[in-house]
Amino acid sequence: MFCLCDGTSFYACSEQIFRPELRNKIVLVASNNDGVVVALSPTAKAAGFKKFTPLFEIQDEIKKHGATVLSSNYELYSAISDRFHSQLSELLSSGDRQYRYSIDESFLHFNTEQKDWFSFGRYIRRKLWTELRVPTGVGFGPTLTLAKAANHASKRLPGFRGVCHLDDNNRAEILGQMSATDVWGIGNRIGARLLLYGVRTALDLSRQDPAEMKRVFNINVANTIYELNGEPKLDFSDVRADKKQIFSTRTFGDRVTQIEELTSALVRHSCNVVKKARNQGSLIKQLLLFAHSRRAQAVSKSVVVTFASATNCYTAVAKEVCKRAAELHIFGVDYAKCGAGAILLVPAKFYQSDLFASPERPGVSAVIDSINQRFESGVKLAASMPVTGQSAMKRCMLTPSYLTCWRDLPIVHCF
């Protein structure tokens, strides 16, 4: 049996954990540089607020409803996410498996089929709320796609109240209440084409001929139909393929004119790319560096760094970025944005390095990863990376990092 546990309004609810006065209040979480709304509490959704709305457009609504706006606290969300997935791992027995699908979603696979899954789902929700104060939707199904559909039903359809066990008895009823685009892997573009075949609901999709859908669309749509009918076609290895390109980019909090600031920002983004590449077991062969000015100056420059031997070593990448950053800098230009992107990646386990290449010390990068994972992202960094400065994000409404920073630990007074 597959299970999908998904934290409800994860960013906003994470902010409410250490701020009890915000529970049941309207909370909006802003994007980088406090530009647009990227996360909403359930009460904010009920009040009519929408994601990806620029904050300056809804100032009147914010004042009207007394909403609280907070900057994205990625350190806090990451720490709570680790605890979220760790709590779920405690539910596994020998032979069971877990797959971290995203920061707030985790797939579980239980070998046994004989269980009161609804009661077990209630137990999972209660455990996560008691230990973390994270509301969670829990969905069970015989396939990954049906588990995803059950999770959707647990939070969106009436009567389930956070837990749904989707089986042969209620499959048609639940799928009939879901649109085709609510099905995992069916986007708006495919959904629009499915309408031409009279497919409006997930139930309509499940009744299509897989061979015909494979011919018209692709094998992924055919596998989705099999999965909707209870025939497993996907495994955790098929859920998310390794990325072919990895980018890190961000608009500056203030305009950047000095080459030192630009170089530091490029190194920071490059190290973010290296971290993501290491997480998926990839090496970087080519790295794209770019910088853009504000529109009035209309300056845009880029350079490609090609490594003699593919690497995922922080120090090796930072060294090359420092050498090439001067090629992007023009005196007198106010830079508004920069970034880095691995445009050519190779799998680390299949790569044969150059016999004559300078040897790297992989232990250094491993130590950096372990320190950052244990304490706080960015505690250990390259000397050329900025600690603070103009290139840092504007997060004027940032809450404390209660779980990752010593100075932000909650203080309890006993009387």
Image (tube, rainbow, N blue to C red):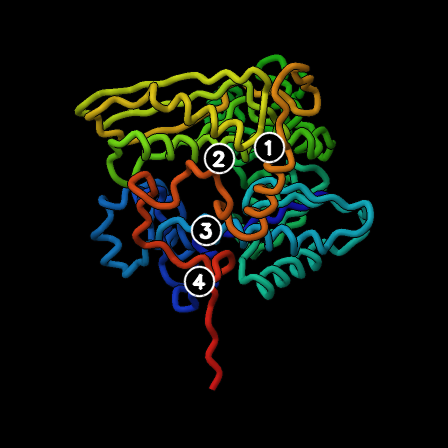
Residue identifier under label 3: 11
Residue identifier under label 4: 408
Sequence-wise, which precedes: disc 1 or disc 4? Answer: 1
Between 330 and 397, which is closer to the camera in this rendering? 330
Sequence-wise, which precedes: disc 4 or disc 2? Answer: 2
Between 199 and 182, which is closer to the camera in this rendering? 182
* Camera-side mark, 1 or 3: 1
Residue identifier under label 2: 272
Q: Is residue 9 left or right of residue 65?
A: right
Q: Quadrant of residue 44?
A: bottom left
> Amino acid under label 2?
Asn
Q: Residues within 10 Å of mark 2 (few under 14, many from 20)?
A: many
As drawn, the label of residue 278 is 1
Sequence-wise, which precedes: disc 1 or disc 3? Answer: 3
* Camera-side mark, 4 or 3: 4
Sequence-wise, which precedes: disc 4 or disc 3? Answer: 3
